Image (tube, coloured by chain):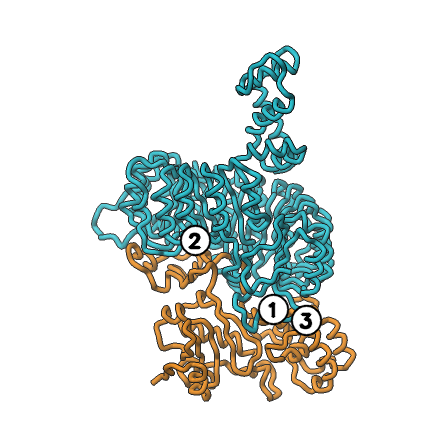
Amino acid sequence: MTEEDSSAKMSEDVERYLKLNPPCSSSSSSSAVAFANKSGTFKSSSPPCPEHVLENVLESVLQFLTSRCDRNAVSLVCKSWYRVEAQTRFEVFIGNCYSLSPARLTHRFKGLRSIVLKGKPRFADFNLMPPNWGAQFAPWVVATAKAYPWLEKVHLKRMFVTDDDLALLADSFPGFKELTLVCCEGFGTSGIAVVANKCRQLKVLDLVESEVTDDEVDWISCFPEGESPLESLSFDCVESPINFNALEGLVVRSPFLKKLRTNRFVSLEELHRLMVRAPQLTSLGTGSFSPDNAPQGEQLPDYAAAFLACKSIVCLSGFREFRPEYLLAISPVCANLTSLNFSYANISPHMLNPIIRNCHNIRVFWALDSIRDEGLQAVAATCKELRELRIFPFDPREDSEGPVSGVGLQAISEGCRKLESILYFCQRMTNEAVTAMSENCPQLTVFRLCIMGRHRPDHVTGKPMDDGFGAIVKNCKKLTRLAVSGLLTDEAFSYIGEYGKLIRTLSVAFAGNSDKALRYVLEGCPKLQKLEIRDSPFGDAGLRSGMHRYCNMRFVWLSSCVLSLGGCRDVAQALPNVVVEVFGSDGDDDDDTVTGDYVETLYLYRSLDGPRKDAPKFVTIL
Amino acid sequence: MEGYSRNGEISPKLLDLMIPQERRNWFHDEKNSVFKTEEKKLELKLGPPGEEDDDESMIRHMKKEPKDKSILSLAGKYFSPSSTKTTSHKRTAPGPVVGWPPVRSFRKNLASGSSSKLGNDSTTSNGVTLKNQKCDDAAKTTEPKRQGGMFVKINMYGVPIGRKVDLSAHNSYEQLSFTVDKLFRGLLAAQRDFPSSIEDEKPITGLLDGNGEYTLTYEDNEGDKMLVGDVPWQMFVSSVKRLRVIKTSEISSALTYGNGKQEKMRR
């Protein structure tokens, strides 16, 4: 949220308060009295203690303040405001679980209902972090179980969650409503079963891109009988078969169910049955989208009719093992779709065309590069409302074919002028196409381009990709997230430092020539919060150039660069509020770990409570 | 690959870095290798002949230590610098890099799933009949409990630099054997004593059947050393902890050493 947005929201909130509590025409003290009466504190005719009044007023106002940036600002005004804010904060967001201890959280906030907690840094998703590094949910669930019996919502990303943790959660929070686990691991279907069974008020159970072990537990059957309050159930990442009849039964008794994302073990026939039972669905994950090896000769279900009946569907995903001949069944909902995720489906331009032609309202589109530049041109021709595009590689290797290129990128930029966010994997790119996008799509806040071949220059001119990325940072004035790739010199980074004034997240891989590049970024980007770099020639001097910044950043990750232990130690000693972790890519303690001076991975982050106590042996905290 | 400023200077360095694994303290080695420049001059390099070779350049190379240091550890993951010498366009591309491209594991293996060509109809029924079955065919990828690929270390006799192999990206022993050849062929050729050029690299074959000069072995989760290829692929993947390529002539001693238990012999 930009500052303009948050202050606009703040004044909105205050306005709302005033509408509900109009001040009296008489003096302000009597309006304070009138207010005190309303909240029932006391009714004496003498004016109440100003401090109490102020706190009451503040409490009422702050109820409406939901933005955490605003709340953080409020808490800094004075001790009294800090107290009141702490009392009225119901949702907390912790971007790095190691930036503070659970005890600190429970000490400050007494009435939390919702916690968002993020653990490992993003590069852990790509095997750059050994397993068992940390980010365990256990200490958090233990602490919050005692402190917040009314906790309703837990949202975790990249945390290690065990079945025991889930069981404790299910036992401790009688009013628990929403569990969302994104990119998590460490648990299995038995943990999910406990949550399903014991959280009787559960509205949301969303498992997204998480690793769920198959404990061979029929967790779907563990939902209690009777009407279910379920509104959202996502289990497309669960790689184990489910009891379909139980699922169907659950759907039948969930009248509020709006979002259902099934896994690939749900066939097309089964999907059809579910859709018939739940025509009120707005978001559907279609599972395999492939029929069972069904007996021939029976009347085939009318899939298109099912989609026609589900008039409310605006979001479609799944298609994990789709059969092209059935794809057109989704046609009845295309005109209403705002979000379409084909990123598991090997769809050709020929298959895409009849569908995308009708998707005028699409705002979010994810697909594989199998749609080719041709498919992207079709998207550009129709999807004028597109805000977010993600193109993933069908064959994610460096030397694969590369069916999308600057041609597709340029077409999108010309057709989809409202584009705000793009993730694009390709094998070759040109500065011209990237520059065109920077000029055609001024609303871009997220630009992530991954040229899969390392150090690839502009394939037409042979020059580095500096100018293209330079144009992006220069022209896209709202850019907050950037990922760079291809052949890049220090010059690209000088542009980023000069123009990337709103950038909060920067991802760099196999780029740059020297420490100057790192310096440009650390000295030039005042809003930088998350910096992740791999395999680039940045060393101690570059690291040192950011000393003044690290206390204000969420984290910095540098792997396979040219850092020395001494250089990292300097940072650790100079910045006591920053935890500096150093480790190798192996989890074992054998000959490959860091024994000499070379640092394979540096991960540093600010922390209020010092180095963590749960670091495994292979991690050295300097 | 001009992105890096490190290029030709790397070649002699790589040979300098052939030190026993326990000595990874680069600053000490720096001193030693300066004094050994004479010997270094005579050693084989991976670059073309006529490479600058004198003491001065060697010292200049030393000063570039910090950058070069990372090469060896990078070589543990991928072998980049020498192969980027553009003398040999025939040389295979640098080996696969850990975590690159940055695609999460569940998004990989789409190409080995029901259709292998882009935009093709999926005509096979891979994965479709999996309902109510425990699926352990190759279509359900060998995804381990841990998030991400399944990387095991692999060392080869005569090559000091170890590598890593992602077993979840393989479906068969043949594929694995091919990868081993790809990973080590160049490194092995660099060790040999004859003045061959890059084109003379011998492919590493016969890893699985005892016919080649080298044989692929592994260490399982109980610490036993075994020949690769005897058990079904899935069983192998679930128990393998580490791979080793040994000389075929050394099989019996390699397997009994440190085993203490049964020694698996083929035939």
Q: Nearer the viewer, mark 3 or mark 2?
A: 2
Residue carrying label 3: B68
Residue farthest to the top, as pictured? A26
Residue A570 coordinates in the image, percent (x, y): 71, 60
Of residue A576 and residue A452, the one placed in the foreground of this image is: A576
- Asked whether residue B60 appears in the rendered view, the answer is yes
- Quadrant location of the C terminus of chain A in the rendered image: bottom right
SS for dot 3: helix
SS for dot 1: loop
Residue B143 drawn above or below residue B36: above
Residue B5 drawn above or below residue A17: below
Of residue A233 and residue A448, the one placed in the foreground of this image is: A233
In the rendered view, does A310 fall on the left or right side of B257?
Answer: left
Residue carrying label 1: A594
State the residue at coordinates (52%, 53%).
Answer: A135
Question: Local crowd at mark 1 within 10 Å, few (<14), some, or many (≥20)?
Answer: many
Residue carrying label 2: A162
In the rendered view, does A598 fall on the left or right side of B250?
Answer: right
SS for dot 2: loop
Q: Chain of mark 1?
A: A
Q: CA distance from mark 3 to mark 1?
A: 16 Å
Residue A433 drawn above or below residue B243: above
What colour do you see for chain B?
orange
What colour do you see for chain A?
cyan
